[in-house]
Amino acid sequence: MPQVELLKIFLASPSDVAKERKYVVEVINEINRIIAPNKGVMIEVVRSEENVFPGYNPEGGQAVLNAQIANMEEYALFVGIMWNRVGTPTPRADSGTVEEFERAVEALERKGQPQIWFYFREAPTQLNTEGELEQRRKVLEFKKKVQCNALTREYKNPSNFRDRFRNHITLWLNERQAPLTLERLWQQLVDRATKTDQMKPEIANNLGMWNPVPLVPKGTPFYFVVNLPTSGYLILLEKNPEGQVWCLSPSCLAPPLRLEAGQVKLPLAYQNTFTADSVGREQMVAIISQDQLNFDWLPRGDDEPLEMKKKHLSEFLKYLKNSLSIQILYGEYRVIA
């Protein structure tokens, strides 16, 4: 089953844009139904009214919120909205919204996320008191400060905001590059491979004869057999049920020799066998090359198998993209309890 990446949005605003806050949730629910599945993502809106439970902090209620949901490094996107109110002051900023914005800026500068979007409603309104006028003055002051380093967007009314936000989030998802996780890099490698039944585990039957099987009971010793369609150098990679990727060949299990076409049984040191340790799906990729590959990190004949990291698979995929003389085969089996 493909991995789904969770993208979290932090929603920040004072209380006078309640309709806009509801529209953010409505639009994201719509995006999650229609667009997000094709992008391999799911979007979650985190907001104080739904994701914060009661608490006490001598530094105030905003500090309670900060501790629970305002670790901004966790978020892919910060969405701020203002109209006529800047909000209630905190010990650290003109309002909770302003404090959340400043925390997002710090996280962006430190860790590269979240991206920061700010919307300002520009619509006629009647402000009757000194307090209301002061709130509006602080909004304009804050807006000017934000616009020194940001491209903001204005809107006329809540439905106009909804339409603009839907368009922006759709553009963002279409242009966003998903991070290349180990899982995604492995899947790119599998997508390049030809599925085959010529790679299977082999276990001993009741007569002591070794036979290929699709299922291996946990704890059972076994060999792994590859029927090479052509002679060449073999690189054999395994992805285990825990999600780790290992280079089994070349290594001490299979020295980097040029192998002839036909059956190859691993480990090549025949006094040894593999042991099925973890229940689940085992995925195998065999790469047969005519030239010996010379990556600095590739194990040598006396090295232990290498646990592959993202940098290894990235370099490997880059090489495969420019090579026409390499065959890539894919097979899988299951370890059962």
Image (cartoon, rainbow, N blue to C red):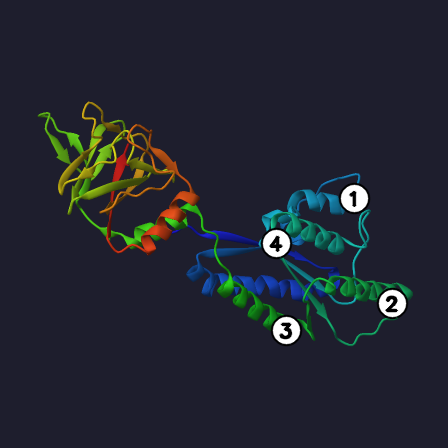
Q: CA distance from mark 4 to mark 2?
A: 32 Å
Residue marked by disc 1: 60
Measuring 25% from the left and 36% from the top, which residue is drawn there? 256
Q: CA distance from mark 2 to mark 3?
A: 25 Å
Measuring 63% from the left and 73% from the top, which residue is drawn there? 159
Is residue 15 visible in the rendered image? The answer is yes
Q: Position of residue 242 (x, y in %)?
A: 38, 37
| Element type where label 3 sits in the image | helix
Viewer-nearest of discs 1 and 4: 4
Amino acid at the residue labelled 3: Ser
Amino acid at the residue labelled 4: Pro
Q: CA distance from mark 2 to mark 1?
A: 25 Å
Measuring 74% from the left and 63% from the top, which residue is drawn there? 148
Q: CA distance from mark 1 to mark 3?
A: 34 Å
Mark linked to residue 133: 2
Q: Nearer the viewer, residue 170 or 62?
A: 170
Which of disc 4 and disc 3 is earlier in sequence?
4
| Element type where label 1 sits in the image | loop
| Element type where label 2 sits in the image | helix
Residue marked by disc 4: 114
Q: Nearer the viewer, residue 147 or 205?
A: 147
Q: Nearer the viewer, residue 88 or 256?
A: 256
Mark linked to residue 159: 3
Which of disc 1 and disc 2 is earlier in sequence?
1
Is residue 1 visible in the rendered image? The answer is no
Which of disc 2 and disc 4 is earlier in sequence?
4
Quarter holding residue 237: top left
Q: Is residue 260 above or below residue 14?
A: above
